[in-house]
Image (cartoon, rainbow, N blue to C red):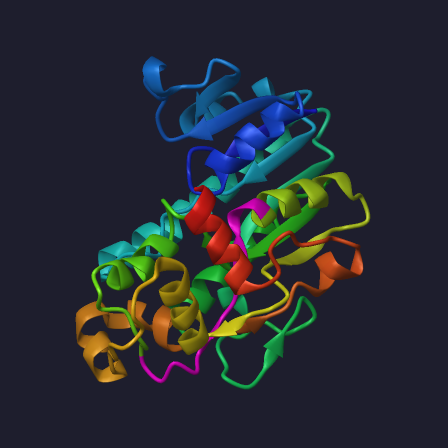
Amino acid sequence: MNIVVCGGTGLVGSHLVPFWLQENHDITVVTRKLPDVSKSNPAVEYITWNDMEQNPTQLEGVDVIVNLSGETLNQRWTTKTKLELVESRMRTVNIVSKAIEALKKKPEVVVQASAMAIYGTSDTETFDERSPKRTMNFPSSLAEQWEAVADSIKGVRLIKLRVSIVLDKHKGAYPLMRLPYILMAGGKLGSGKQWNSWIHIDDMVRLIDFCVKNKAIEGPVNASSPNPVRYADLGKTIAKVTHRPHWFHVPSIALKPTLGEMSDILLDGQRVIPKKALDHGFTFLFPEILGALDHIEKTQ
């Protein structure tokens, strides 16, 4: 297949591109700026977002577009940062939508990243793809805006991938979770009862591939393990795989002044289940948190 990966150098994209290269697909990566020759992959074609916006017809003949682009939420949410988070998502989705509109032959499928935050937060509810969207805070509002713009993508099978916490040793949230344990200061954050929905990076890549190849899948798809965990249990598991103690408690009142609104991600959780993936027969390599983190610590 001829595949375009927008955001192909990020956490998920940097694993997805090699996975598809091994399957002998032709890959084009869309990025903000072209990489140095020394850091680029000779098997991959690179174009910038400006290139794609100004000359969308270069995508004629593309079978699949995956858009994973968007500024990370792992930063303090100032007014300026919030605007950048919104703009980075709206602009890239709009460019993809307009590019597809300009094509004579449209791709068969578009996988557009979204976020599990769209369901809001709860300590008691369980969310799947049939659950209503709820605007409760900045992340849920951001996810709802993201998907509203994604709905402008017409004439293709559209998958809105509602991404949970992607576990990878070197990028994303897990290195930040792991660091206090490495420094012998790991322990419970807040009540410890908040839910964490997560997915191992290998399952994330396999799920995207599964969605692309399974023509019966469209609409929202939860990219999460079937077994979310409470934060206290997640912390104990990190302690176990890193061989460090789980003893230090950071109360909610200490996190909010330091992190501001971003503390919502740590203190308010969501129990998200990948019902659509399971219903279509997707099998997780790492359905349990212990196996996932043990594999990450030993192999990555």
State whether residue 280 is above or below residue 171.
below
Q: Quadrant of residue 257?
A: bottom left
In the image, 182 versus 250, the foreground residue is 182
The quadrant of the rendering that contains the N terminus is top right
State whether residue 217 is above or below residue 275.
above
Residue found 67% across the figure and 25% down from its top: 23
Residue found 32% across the figure and 59% down from its top: 178
Is residue 166 toward the left or the right of residue 251 in the image?
right
Q: Residue furthest front?
A: 243
State whether residue 35 is above or below residue 90.
above
State whether residue 71 is above or below residue 137.
above
What is the number of callouts on the image? 0
Q: Quadrant of residue 58?
A: top right
For residue 77, say whether it is visible.
Answer: no
Q: Give percent across and percent down for residue 230.
A: 47, 76
Q: Give percent across and percent down for residue 246.
A: 31, 73
The quadrant of the rendering that contains the C terminus is top left
In this picture, which residue range is highlighted in magenta?
A: 190-202
Q: Quadrant of residue 226?
A: bottom right
In the image, 283 versus 152, the foreground residue is 283
In the image, 27 versus 186, the foreground residue is 186
Is residue 212 one of those drawn in magenta?
no
For residue 233, say whether it is visible.
Answer: yes
Is residue 171 toward the left or the right of residue 211 in the image?
left
Is residue 83 toward the left or the right of residue 230 in the image?
left
Q: Give percent across and percent down for residue 37.
A: 35, 13
Q: Give percent across and percent down for residue 232.
A: 41, 77
In the image, 183 versus 165, the foreground residue is 183
